[in-house]
Amino acid sequence: MVSPTPSPASRALTPIVLAYGAATLAGQVLILREILVLAQGQELKLALGLWCWLLWTGLGSLLGGWLAARRSPGPATLSGLLALLAWLLPGTLLLARALPTLTPQAIGQSLPPASALVLFLALLAPFCLVSGCFFPFATTVQRTLEPLGATGRVYALEALGAALGVCLLQLFLVGQFPAFTLSLGAGVCLAVIAWTLAPPRHLTGRLALGATFLALAASLVFSPSLENFSRQVQWPGREVAASLDSPYALLTATREADQISFFANRVWHFTYPDPYSAEMAVHLGLLEHPHPQKVLLLGGGAAGLIPEALKYGSLSRIDYVELDPDLVRLVQRLVPEAMVLRGHDPRVHLIFQDARRFLTRSTPRYDVILMNLPEPGSAQLNRYYTREFFATVAQHLKPDGVFSFALTGGETSLNPLRAAYLALTYHTLGQIFPEVLVFPGERVRFFASPIPGLLVRDPKFLAARLVERGLKLRYVRDYYLLADLSLPRQEYVRRLLERYPPEINTDLNPKSYFYDLILTGAREGLPLKEVLLALKSLSPVWPWIILGLGGVAGLIFLRRRPTGVCLAQVLVMGLGGMALEVLVLVLCQVQLGLLYRQLGLLVAAFMAGMGIGGAWGVRLAGRRRATPALLAACQGGLALLALFTALALPLLTATGFLPPDFFLQGIYLVILFTAGFAGGGVFSLASNLWHQNRPATSWRDGLFYAADLLGATLGSLGLSLVVLPVWGVVPALFALAGLHFWAVVLIWL
């Protein structure tokens, strides 16, 4: 028997859906990287951007279902949506870069949560609404060709296309092409696919699609000039001296008069020349040691700190650890005075490595370790201010060694929130070091030593060491030491910090997130601070009681409601899958510091699993083997995955075992792939079971997809604004495990 020849519509649909999945997720990665820059590298605000993305896509899915029910879309309609996305992708990227000009914010100031929410909602609405409309339109076309399993098939094709698109994007992202050029290239590809597979039937549509291709192709030719223009509008009122998209962050150098400031993801790193900051960062730490010889500098070497340290004749070696080689190259290109970085002094040794990884995998001990890194407003930076990191630093100090760094304080006084933020670091240091000293000022400087009684509190002794070592400095002089670091001022700060209850900042419970949210939220006058403080004051038992009562109420309400059960399964899958994905991204940043570089690969692993899982569910549905037992198995698998991760993380931390980086990254890729596979299976199986009770329609397709995205929005928003800042990673994983076990119970009621 000869199989029927596929119709033109059937041949066109599969590549169109694959192209849609590839373009939308590649676009998501490109745009979320821009959001990460806007949010100054803060992963929780990246999750807020992801929430906005999912919200608008879900609303677009509902709109698309409503529209598809009132008309009969065909492949040409889908091509029209691809053409719209071809315009919107580079347009959204350009708008993201223009937001600092359109809505001015202070350079170096963290974006408050409410402002971030409004900006991200406005930025993402056009692209995500059009993207959301595509799914119900495509399922309507698929149902006319093959009714059985249409929803699951389109879902699986979209996920597979997404994984393919992100994998291809990852190959091009490693410094080969700028992001704006990639967005224009993706737009040209979408226009070509739309014209080739399902061109418009009317002349007007053909002219519009042809104009789209020509405009995008011309823009691609002039993309270097457009790239430079877009980087300039990112910094209103400043001259952009250079911009470089490194594997770790977007590096930008701006020029103001005779000074050049260097930023990474819009976070200020240093300004050159800035002798005041350089002297404070170096000399106070070195003066605390009686005879410094070996010094480790964690960041800041390119800021002029190395020449300051070399003023000490006693020094025999300076190890300067810098994560990003591109930052050093950028400084050497723009600041000729940084010649010492090129190895002209044999005492200076430049090491390109993550500071935490260097300390974990090396053995040298130092007299003084000076840390000059930005504040802990993100997972990548918080990992340098945790108990685990401080313990590693202590292992690399000689018995009379000194560890020093600074955080933002106040010249004359500290408001309660800022004092609580500083007290967090003070108490965390106290967990590891028997002696901790705090110097007051606009930058509160911390000193820690493994031996009690070593640190010098009396500024007269520090002034005497200045004279003894023959140091003639511009700012760190006797009058500054005697006035600004007087014993009464030191005692005021110490008592103020000790007044706060001891809180400890750890890798798995990054409390700096909590204080960053309330400090930035307080600027807007919103009740976020009060809400977070109230949740923090709750007994740990109450959240579990509330979740338990909510779960019981949900079981009672949904019992014997097949439609509600199916929608609840997809909503729980979306919530749990997205929350688990965000948690893995945060963990990858904490333990590896590679999120900016590996974001595409991590997302691709999740989407590849979702595509294969969705295809597996469609295949089972085609064989009439989609059963509640398999649906329960998928939800149970997600529960066990979250439970295993929650149990393994504290064990890994307690033992101090650190697997090789490639092994750890492989584990996270496997976790994301497995979570995606189970999530794709849940969607396909639940959609098939739902359609056994309710006839499939375009509106219901849109509703079902929107339920998935609604769950994902709840997962990303709740995790980023509440669960992770207040309770940490492990309780969040236990809550996810309980949620998926609840979904299993719901199936069998």
Image (cartoon, rainbow, N blue to C red):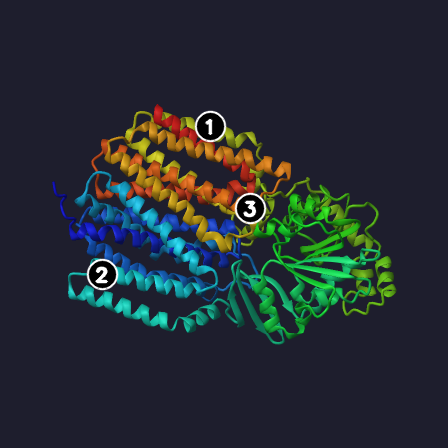
Residue 644's disc is: none
Snapshot quadrant of residue 444 = bottom right
Q: Is residue 80 left or right of residue 718?
A: left
Check the image and report above or below for 725 versus 181. above
Count of numbered circles in the view = 3
Of labels 3 and 1, the one closer to you: 1
Q: Earlier in the sequence, mark 3 or mark 1?
A: 3
Dot 2 falls on a residue whose secondary structure is helix
Q: What is the three-letter code of the residue carrying label 2? A: Thr
- Residue at which label 1 appears: 548
- Residue at which label 3 appears: 529
Dot 3 falls on a residue whose secondary structure is helix
Q: Quadrant of the N terminus?
A: top left
Of labels 2 and 3, the one closer to you: 2
- Residue at which label 2 appears: 196
Of labels 2 and 1, the one closer to you: 2
Q: CA separation, marks 3 and 1?
A: 26 Å
